[in-house]
Amino acid sequence: MALFQWEESLSVGLSDIDRQHKQLIEMIGKLDDEMRKGKGKDILEKILNGLVNYALMHFETEEKYFLKYGYPESENHRQIHKTFVEKVSTFKKQYAENQRGLTIEVMDFLMDWLKNHIKGEDKKYAPFLQSKGLK
């Protein structure tokens, strides 16, 4: 059983966003499971590719809502998204170069993302979007 599972404290109360966040939690759980078996490196490429796809889909969804409803902090949030994409690109490059310890670095990054971005930054826009009728 995965150590990292969806919990209500991660919910922003917006169905599309929560569904996408659940996909990220699933990826983190898979990475954690494989790391515990000593096989984290075996799944790392799949996780990194999944993060690229996740970022494209998820950030597009959020930014679409920001534009549609005029979220006043959208530019700052977009910059945070850009930083995530750059970091994942760096991880992919490091993976291709066979960098040691990368699996742990990726896990640390993802755990920080959960704590600071989803539980922090994403919770900031949720009331605004909900006030516009988004559910």
Image: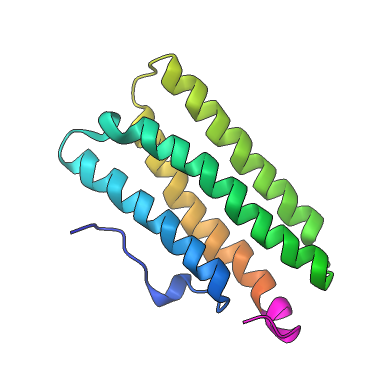
Q: Which residue is at the front of the view, 108 or 26? A: 26
Residue 134 belongs to the span the image colors magenta: yes
Query: On the rendered structure, is 43 left or right of 54?
Result: left
Across and down, in percent, residue 59 comes to 64, 53
Nearer-the-camera pick, 10 or 129: 129
Question: In the visual, does 88 lie left or right of 2?
Answer: right
> Viewed as shown, does residue 102 lie left or right of 128?
left
For residue 64: magenta? no
> Can I make out residue 45 in this image?
yes
Q: Is residue 113 above or below residue 86?
A: below
Rendered position, 36 above or below 134: above
Residue 116 drawn above or below residue 87: below
The residue that appears at 63% across and 62% down in the rendered structure is 121
Q: Where residue 88 appears, x then y in whole percent?
A: 53, 35
Picture layout, residue 128 above or below residue 57: below
Question: In the figure, is residue 134 to the left or right of 120?
Answer: right
- Residue 128, percent from left and from top: 73, 78
Question: The N terminus lies in which quarter of the figure?
Answer: bottom left
Q: Residue furthest left?
A: 37
For residue 71, say whether it is visible. no
What colour scheme does the image use? rainbow
Write the residue at 51% across / 52% down: 113
Magenta region, residue range: 127-135
Q: Quadrant of the C terminus?
A: bottom right
